[in-house]
Amino acid sequence: MSDIAYRLLLRGRVQGVGLRPFIYRLAQQHGVCGWVQNGMGQVLLHVEGEAQALSYFFDELMSVPEPAQFCVAEKRLVNGELSSEFVIRPSGPSGADVHLLPDLPPCDHCLQELFDPDNRRYHYPFINCSHCGPRYTLLQRLPYDRINTSMVDFPLCQSCSKEYQAVTDRRFHAEPLACEVCGPTLTYHAGSERVSGSELALTAAVVAIKQGKIIAVKGVGGYHLICDARNSSAIRRLRQRKGRPHKPLAVMGLATQLAELVVLDQLTLQTLHRPARPIVLAVARVDTVDIAPELSEIGVMLPNSPLHHLLLNDLAIPLIATSANLSGEPVLTMEDEVEHRLSEVADGFLHHDRTIIHPADDPLYRIIDNTPRPLRLGRGNAPLELTLPFTLDRPLLALGGQMKNSIALAWQNRIVLSPHIGELHTPRSQQLLADSVQWLSTLYQITPEKILLDAHPAYSYRRWANASGLPIHEIYHHHAHASQLTGEYPEISRWLLFSWDGVGLGPDQTLWGGETLWGQAGDWQRLASLRPFSLPGGDKAGREPWRSAAALCWQVGIDYRPPVGGDLLYQAWKKKLNCHPISSIGRLFDGAAALLGLCNEVSFEGQAAMGLEALAADTVADAIELPLVQDQQGIWRADWEPLLTMLHNEQLSTSQRAAIVHESLAEMLLQQALLLRQQCGQFAVGLSGGVFQNKRLSERVLLLLEQHNFKACLPNIVPVSDAGLAYGQVLAYYHANHK
């Protein structure tokens, strides 16, 4: 039987995933000749051989193991090249069809070698192969070859070079490939103490942690501040030095260690073992007073690098592992910078000399309604590449929100969401946003032609956007929130979207946060909302929940004595001086928390609402009715006033009152949906905005909606909070301009 030949074009996640050696071995196995080549962000494949052999080859080609993911974009018969062997050709030029691979944790094979005394990479903190190791964080440019990564600083030794060039080796073209002879090394700094050499430096750090010290450890995407998770004194010193009195701290450990701290059911374990090795919120088994004050969950994660495995193995204890940064700023990545900025925080520094090109904080998940939901994208799952349900006519850059910032680059039918950047209130955060724009544009070889941003005039990225010279298009905050969910469910055309969060500017120039929107992306109509209340102090209310409590009480004539300001503040409120009408569920949660004595001031965004949810815990409670009244504009307003009477009822325990708040808001949402179904007909119900990070509220809402025959949706892929806002901005813009 004569040979036939095919030319294939493979697109998707095809580079840096061991695809070429997989194809090579497959060709050898089936006696197929030809070649394979990286190029233009895709893989070109030429094969020739007998028809039966090619049939087997193509069948097994589609069974390529993770993390490779691709589609056959083209497959055509061609003239044979009379090849007598199968070869891997050098990479061709890169193009705009690139697909970046996030960083990967060490694979099982590498972990076995890491702890094998007879292996030449025994205890080497940077062990990796074609199936694992850093990718995005060390990439300078494409194509993904060693010379285009920060590993260019480490010429391969003879042994590593042999592995790198051997097609049948597990480390064939593993770009971060290294060993103790030729690769990165650890150093330990503590005051005047300088310890060089990976084994000695690691030992010094382990000794310091055992002594109760706080160590800054350089990982894959940045530094962590690490200390003994069982040492209350060390944790208190970390909180005091970092100025983080209440915000939860993450715990890193092996699964057996974490199981002593939290409930690890099957779904939680599966989520922890995702390739991103995310932080996962899990129900605590122990007192959380040190790790997560006044909360019932602890954020836990498995080690995500060989270095972390070595630390946990040597210490045999779980570790606090929190981002090494100043509050709200991006994670630190540079040796000099971390020692300068954290000199008063860390007792020692465990560095390595592999440059981190792109910072990436840890991703964060919470399991809501038996589904892992991302709360933050980061190392291992970002840049997040998604397919849009439409094709753009020009490349767009979406800048997201002010809090939990993440940006997005969109072109053709593709969108890429950046890793978590953070709050944009500091120059360093704003610089990282600008750098992220440049990196994504360079790596994907896409130049945006328009900027999408939030309509709020005071967002920190406004100056940068104006200076860019690009056309700017404003998207209202809650329209973007509503639209971000529709991208995950493109088959649904009629929506009732509940967009609940802290605060965002609405089209009527008032502050929204408890909105019910009907329609579809790009065409939202506000049908219902919360009864507005005048909030004193503007942006200060986000850090001072007592201001929300004051506004709610004063609005209905209840006496309330604020901790500061007294009668002067009340008089200013009566005259509407620096007071703004707001319809925010997030601020309602803040006010309830303050009235229950949980906190008058908070040290991090969302603290009051998180405390209220934890206080409610599993307490059983009945909802109280929150009447719906139509205002002069035809908007149905839910009246929160009955909650205030209940919150002041000291015959009920604080946990009962906290539970009633949750039950009543869930019932309020259901009643709005039922009323509007009569008015508008059938629709799917969507939940979007930071309030729906609340597990108790969201699960109760989803159950009630299901019981009343609604199709109810919560995001699964993109964060429900402002961390997913950039995605929604792109969807809102496209549909508004393509009606």
Image: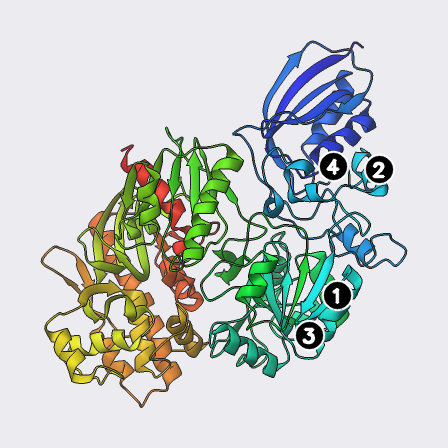
Q: The C terminus appears in which quarter of the rendering?
A: top left
Relative height, residue 622 to residue 507 (above, below): below
Q: The N terminus appears in which quarter of the rendering?
A: top right
Residue 664 makes an appearance in the image: no
User: Residue at image x 58%, y 28%?
Assistant: 94
**Which residue is tagged 2?**
162
Q: How far apart are the two marked residues, 3 and 1, measured between alpha carbons?
A: 15 Å
Of circles 3 and 4, which is in front? 3
The image shows residue 135 at horizontal and vertical percentages of 63, 45
The image shows residue 710 at horizontal and vertical percentages of 35, 53
The image shows residue 8 at horizontal and vertical percentages of 64, 21
Residue 65 makes an appearance in the image: yes
Amino acid under label 3? Ile
Relative height, residue 439 to residue 213 (above, below): above
Within 10 Å of disc 4 (Cα), the crowding (few <14, some 14-19, many 20+) is many
Residue 663: quarter of image: bottom left
Within 10 Å of disc 1 (Cα), the crowding (few <14, some 14-19, many 20+) is some
Relative height, residue 199 to residue 379 (above, below): below
**Which residue is tagged 3?**
209
Q: Identify the mark nearer the N-term, 1 or 2.
A: 2
Of circles 3 and 1, which is in front? 1
Q: Element at badge 3?
A: helix
**Which residue is tagged 4?**
173
Amino acid under label 4? His
Q: Identify the mark nearer the N-term, 3 or 1.
A: 1
Q: Single out the residue that lies furthest toward the front.
A: 192
**Which residue is tagged 1?**
195
